[in-house]
Structures are given as C-alpha cells and as structure tokens.
C-alpha cells in the first residue's frame, strides 16, 4: 500500500467531510463546530491560517484527514484527525500525524495541541508516541468547544530537543 499526503484543495471538501463524518458519527454526535468546519473547510480552517492534509492510498483513494486550526499567534490545534476503518492499523494515522506536526512547525507553530476523548485509547497512544503529553490546564481553558472532549494534549517533542524532519506536504511512503 502506497500512501501520499496531499494538501487541501476545494475539490476535496466532500472527501474531508465524508471521512470526518464517518468517525465522529460512529462514536459521538456531530456538534455545531464540526458542522461548520465540514461545511466550509477552506473558510473555517485554511483561510484563517491553518491547513488540511489528506492521506491518499494508491488502492483505496482518500482514507484520512488531519487539520491544523490556527487558534492564536503561533498556536495551532490539531483537529479532524481521522482514518477510514478499511485503512486503520496500517500506519496511515501515524503518517498523517507526523505530517501534521511538520506542517504546524512549518507554519511557525510554537504551541500545538489537540483535544480528544478518553474512549479513543488507540489515538491517545499514537499521540503519546509522537510527543504529545496530557495537560489538565489546557483542557480547562480550551476543552469547552466540544462536549465530547475530556482529554487535552500538548505537543512537547520539540522541547525534548529531538530533530523534526522538514515539512513533507507531498510525502509518499510505502506502508504495511
């Protein structure tokens, strides 16, 4: 399986919505912030200074998404991280997450965080393996936008002094 990370364009808006609706509706309920972002990904995420990445499998087509929402000066929230069930367990999520981290750093992020739910244990382990740490203060300050979020994590990998690969918006990799 060959997976390529693609940048967003408006022709992919339907795929972005389809992939995210699938995971959100399978575990939770769509909330107003979800509806707004899925209805207008460019206006809600990209135009204000964020980014959207999509994972495209050579056989299955578009199978994953990852967004970066600009939330402040040099601050981004990792949002809409999703992989379709048929592509899960093959490393697509890790590839997307790493590309998202690299894209955030390329956009000048000094602070990168995410909000999730404790039911998403596989995702939480993925985030922990890739430099995110739990942050209760962050949950208290940023967690109110979504009813489903009870976990907040802050990216700390850069603080550990580990090197980050340069941005790879058109990364092509062979997985599993």
Image (cartoon, helix red, strand yellow):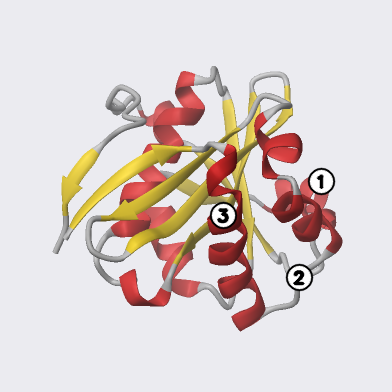
- Label 1, secondary structure: give it: helix
Badge 1 or badge 3: first in the primary sequence: 3
Residue 8: x, y in percent?
51, 38
Res 67 visible: no
Residue 139: x, y in percent?
73, 53
Q: Nearer the viewer, residue 145 or 153?
A: 145
Residue at the (68%, 37%) spot, across then down? 42
Label 2 to label 3, Cα distance in Å?
A: 14 Å
Q: Is residue 36 above or below residue 20?
A: above
Badge 1 or badge 2: first in the primary sequence: 2
Q: Nearer the viewer, residue 68 or 35?
A: 35
Q: Is residue 93 above or below residue 43?
A: below
Q: Is residue 155 above or below residue 38?
A: above
Pointer 1 residue: 141
Residue at the (77%, 54%) spot, across then down? 143
Pointer 3 residue: 16
Residue 72: x, y in percent?
75, 25
The outermost residue toward the bottom is 26
């Amino acid at each position: 399986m060959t997976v390529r990370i693609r940048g967003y364009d408006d022709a992919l808006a339907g795929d972005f919505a389809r992939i995210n609706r699938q995971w959100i509706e399978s575990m939770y309920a769509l909330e107003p912030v979800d509806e707004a972002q899925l209805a207008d990904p460019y206006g809600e995420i990209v135009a204000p200074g964020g980014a959207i990445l999509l994972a495209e499998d050579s056989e299955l087509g578009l199978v994953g998404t990852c967004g970066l929402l600009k939330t402040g000066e040099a601050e981004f929230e990792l949002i809409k991280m999703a992989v379709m069930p048929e592509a899960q367990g093959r490393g697509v999520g890790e590839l997307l997450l790493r590309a998202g981290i690299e894209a955030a750093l390329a956009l000048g992020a000094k602070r990168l965080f995410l909000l999730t739910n404790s039911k998403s244990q596989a995702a939480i382990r993925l985030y922990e393996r890739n430099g995110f740490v739990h942050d209760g203060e962050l949950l208290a300050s940023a967690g109110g936008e979504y009813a489903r979020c009870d976990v907040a994590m802050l990216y700390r990998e850069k603080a550990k002094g580990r090197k980050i690969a340069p941005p790879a918006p058109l990364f092509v990799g062979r997985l599993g």
